[in-house]
Amino acid sequence: GTETIAFPNAQTYLHHRKLLGFPEDSTLIQRILPKGFYWRAEKLPHVHWNLKTAYPPAEVTFQSKEEYMKHRAEHGMPEDWSDIKTVKGCYWGYNGEDTVWWAEDGKAGTETIAFPNQEEYMEHRRLLGFPLDFSLIERI
């Protein structure tokens, strides 16, 4: 098995390495980063990452496939598109009315959140990674 040891200071750590025949430096240290989780809004292309299991806002938004794959490798995840949670919500409104709603279940007509003003609507879109405009609103 693998044993994990915490060293109280650098001197103790370097002495431990010397006893095992390793150079007295920080080479061969395996850096372990927290896995966190990956997510995306169903209707948008970008994948995001958060350390905790709450989203939004995104802590990291990936701008390229290469950036995404590198991040997964660094966090001990397979370099593929698995384990990406999807936010299924949608923005919608009634024809002829200005109010925009967010349906958490992704079904237009489900009145989950009504935005009382444009600022709160735009902030919600920003947190989910949507364009800061009035696109992608289903009208019923």
Image: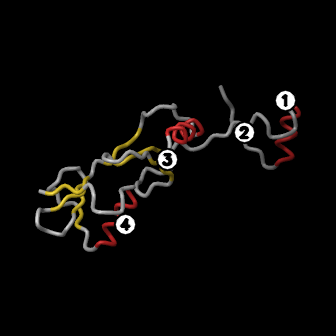
Q: Which callout, 3 or 1, points at the residue further toward the start of the chain? A: 1
Across and down, in percent, residue 124 comes to: 34, 63
Q: Where is 125 relative to 107, above or below?
A: below
Quadrant position of the N terminus in the picture: top right
Which quadrant of the view contains residue 131? bottom left
Mark 3, residue position: 63
Give the number of the mark in front: 4 or 3: 3
Tag 2: Cα neighbours inside 10 Å, few (<14), some, or many (≥20)?
few
N-terminal of the two: label 1 or label 4? 1
Q: Earlier in the sequence, mark 1 or mark 2?
A: 2
CB atoms of marks 2 and 3 within 8 Å = no
The residue that mark 1 highlights is 20
- Answer yes or no: do the residues labelled 1 and 2 have beta carbons within 8 Å? no
Residue on which the image places disc 2: 5
Label count reads 4
Q: Which residue is mark 4?
A: 123
**Residue at position x 87%, y 38% from top?**
24
**Residue 117 rendering spot, x and y as whole percentages:** 27, 74
Q: Residue at x 32, y 63 (%)?
A: 133
**81 or 6: nearer the viewer:** 81
- Residue at 21% over, 65% down: 100
Q: Secondary structure at mark 3?
A: loop
Q: Secondary structure at mark 1?
A: loop
Amino acid bearing label 4: Glu
Could you say whether the residue bearing mark 4 is in a helix, strand or loop?
A: helix
Q: Nearer the viewer, mark 2 or mark 3?
A: 3
The C terminus sits in image quarter: bottom left
Q: CA distance from mark 2 to mark 4?
A: 45 Å
